Amino acid sequence: MDPNRQLHQLEREIAATVADLAAAQRRIAQLVGEPAISAQSVDRFTHERDSWRIDREARDDAINAAAHRKSDRGEDVRQRMREAEHTLHHTSGHERGPSMSR
């Protein structure tokens, strides 16, 4: 892959990640003041955080495995990583962080 193209792609991915982080920070700020959130027990938060971490680690493991797998067709590693992340994103219930809806 052309180094300039690769650099441009990485810069886009970083910008998207920074935007996701900013959105998550805004959402956290909104949720902090919600009465329904403050009424939850510490155990509930601990359970949700632990569930989210398990799902996140499984997602990261799948992405890393896809990145390290050799492809017979010479596919781009980043494309395989995106595909693995997309698959896990649509199969995991906690990919966006802890959920208080249960």
Image (spheres, helix red, strand yellow):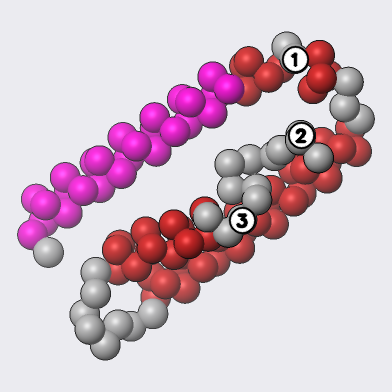
**Residue nearer the viewer, 88 or 81:** 88
Which residues are drawn in magenta? 2-27
Q: CA distance from mark 2 to mark 3?
A: 15 Å
Label 2, residues with CA under 10 Å away: few <14, some 14-19, many ≥20:
few
Counting from the top left corner in percent of width and height, residue 67 is at 38, 70
Indicate whether residue 22 is drawn in magenta.
yes
Q: Amino acid at mark 3?
A: Ser
Residue 85 occupies which quadrant of the picture?
bottom left
The residue identified by callout 3 is 92
Query: On screen, 91 above or below 47?
Result: below
Mark 2 or mark 1, which has the lower sequence index? 1
Mark 3 or mark 1, which has the lower sequence index? 1
Q: Are marks 3 and 1 in contact (CB under 8 Å)?
A: no
The C terminus, quarter of image: top right
Q: Which mark is residue 34?
A: 1
Residue at left offset 53%, top offset 55%: 90
Image-based side of 23 in relation to 95, left or right: left
Q: Amino acid at mark 2?
A: Met
Q: CA distance from mark 3 to mark 1?
A: 25 Å
Number of numbered discs on residues: 3
Residue at left offset 39%, top offset 30%: 19
Q: Amino acid at mark 1?
A: Glu
Q: Main secondary structure of the magenta part?
A: helix
Residue at left offset 90%, top offset 38%: 43
The residue identified by callout 2 is 100
